[in-house]
Image (cartoon, rainbow, N blue to C red):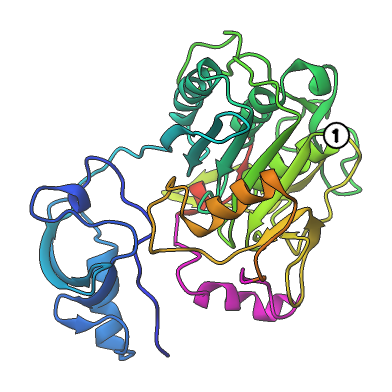
């Protein structure tokens, strides 16, 4: 089977951005250590490709042949390294006739995202933005408390004061108490202060006080990212979705370490202030063609690798900006599941360029003990 190896984005200060390499969004990987990454399905070929794309240790050297957006071929050599992720990127504003629109690419609900999101919101608030485009197309999830912080920073106190961000629901044997911590189950609020991930706990969070938010999504938008969509809809904030159907993970877990192995067993699901959490088939823009999940106002738009993320001409961002001015959409082109049966969920994996592989730590809804 032919595969699609296009580059979605790069991490700053990584081997991909080193001098003489300079990979960028939209580059296509054709060969990995001499093996055809598109057409070689042999066992040895796949092993070589995986070893190159997912090196086991720091300091490994691998060679890649890539094609850039102009169609030119390049052969680059990279050495694997331990890279500090930058979960929030491309924060900025777009000038429109109806006021500045904020944009941010948010890729991971990891600990360092707390300080990065605060900085981003402070920047956008100082710019007096009239709308926000939150790009979570590649955000697989992570810490639920960070999602609760961001949801508050988008909406502000008005719609969120005293409201539930997410209620954790275990099975019928545990309706009142968390079986893992032994504590009474209580709604998770929209956090108004920092939770101590990368900023000392208890610091007031800034807020944009927006009545609506545009979210750019894809099949890799999962779990804690979907909680942002669900929770804001639960308190009456208008969410407009542009992109593809999200992955559909209203479930979560406490990671459990045992003898060097971390287990991620599904333990609970989350519901919003209206008690809704049944989006196992994801959230879908309302004009999605084919089988769709829970409908959300917006536009079905395929991922656009011909433009940089944050470029107003990039397909999904352009559609969001257009929808602001007039609630209309281009012809549906985003990805939708061909069936709701779990046996074909693997079809998402083959969606061209719209899903990336991440560790379980970065693809789920997680609680801290």
The extreme front residue here reads 97
The percent position of residue 327, horizontal first and vertical second, equals 75, 51
Side (left or right) of 14 relative to 364? left
- Classify mark 1: helix, strand or loop: loop
Side (left or right) of 330 relative to 9? right
User: Mark 1 packing: few (<14 Cα in 10 Å), some, or many (20+)?
Assistant: some
Q: Nearer the viewer, residue 266 or 59?
A: 59
The extreme top residue here reads 203
The percent position of residue 128, horizontal first and vertical second, equals 57, 19
| 91 lies above or below 51 | above
Location of residue 238 by image quarter: top right
Quarter that holds the C terminus: top right
Q: Nearer the viewer, residue 66 or 242?
A: 242
Side (left or right) of 329 relative to 64? right
Q: Nearer the viewer, residue 302 or 164?
A: 302
Viewer can see residue 369: no
Residue drawn 23% across the image and 44% down it: 82
| 253 lies above or below 212 | below
Q: Nearer the viewer, residue 179 or 116?
A: 116
Residue drawn 8% across the image and 54% down it: 20
Q: Does the magenta stretch mainly form a helix, a strand or a loop? A: loop
Residue for badge 1: 236
Location of residue 191 by image quarter: top right
Residue drawn 68% across the image and 44% down it: 325
Viewer can see residue 306: yes
Q: Which residues make up the magenta segment?
A: 333-358
| Residue 348 magenta | yes
The percent position of residue 348, horizontal first and vertical second, equals 58, 72
Quarter that holds the N terminus: bottom left
Residue drawn 45% across the image and 62% down it: 356
| Residue 147 magenta | no
| 236 lies above or below 224 | above
């Amino acid at each position: 089977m032919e595969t699609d190896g296009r580059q979605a984005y790069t991490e700053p200060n990584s081997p991909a951005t080193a001098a003489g390499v300079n990979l960028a969004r939209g580059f296509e990987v054709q060969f990995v250590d001499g093996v055809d990454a598109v057409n070689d399905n042999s066992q040895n070929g796949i092993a070589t490709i995986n070893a190159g794309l997912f090196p086991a240790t720091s300091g490994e050297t691998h060679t890649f042949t890539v094609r850039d957006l102009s169609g030119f071929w390049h052969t680059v050599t990279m050495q694997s390294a331990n890279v500090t992720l930058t979960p929030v990127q491309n924060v900025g504003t777009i000038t429109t006739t109806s006021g500045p629109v904020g944009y941010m690419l948010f890729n991971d609900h990891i600990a360092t995202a707390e300080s990065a999101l605060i900085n981003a919101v402070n920047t956008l608030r100082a710019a007096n933005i009239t709308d926000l485009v939150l790009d979570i197309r590649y955000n697989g999830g992570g810490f639920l408390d960070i999602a609760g912080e961001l949801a508050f920073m988008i909406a502000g106190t008005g719609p969120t004061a005293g409201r539930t961000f997410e209620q954790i629901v275990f099975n019928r044997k545990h309706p009142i108490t968390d079986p893992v911590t032994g504590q009474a189950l209580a709604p998770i609020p929209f956090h108004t202060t920092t939770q101590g991930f990368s900023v000392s706990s208890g610091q007031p969070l800034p807020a944009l006080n927006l009545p609506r938010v545009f979210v750019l999504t894809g099949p890799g938008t999962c779990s804690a990212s979907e909680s942002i969509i669900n929770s804001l809809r639960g308190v009456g904030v208008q969410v407009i979705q542009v992109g593809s159907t999200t992955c559909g993970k209203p479930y979560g877990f406490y990671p459990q370490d045992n003898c060097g192995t971390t287990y991620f067993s599904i333990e609970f699901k989350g519901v919003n202030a209206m008690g809704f959490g049944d989006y196992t088939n994801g959230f879908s823009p309302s004009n999605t063609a084919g089988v769709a999940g829970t409908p959300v106002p917006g536009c079905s738009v395929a991922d656009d690798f011909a433009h940089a993320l944050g470029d107003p001409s990039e397909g999904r961002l352009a559609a969001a900006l257009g929808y602001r001015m007039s609630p209309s959409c281009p012809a549906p082109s985003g990805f939708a599941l061909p069936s709701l049966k779990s046996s074909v969920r693997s079809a998402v994996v083959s969606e061209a360029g719209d899903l990336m592989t991440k560790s379980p730590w970065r693809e789920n809804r997680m609680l801290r003990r």
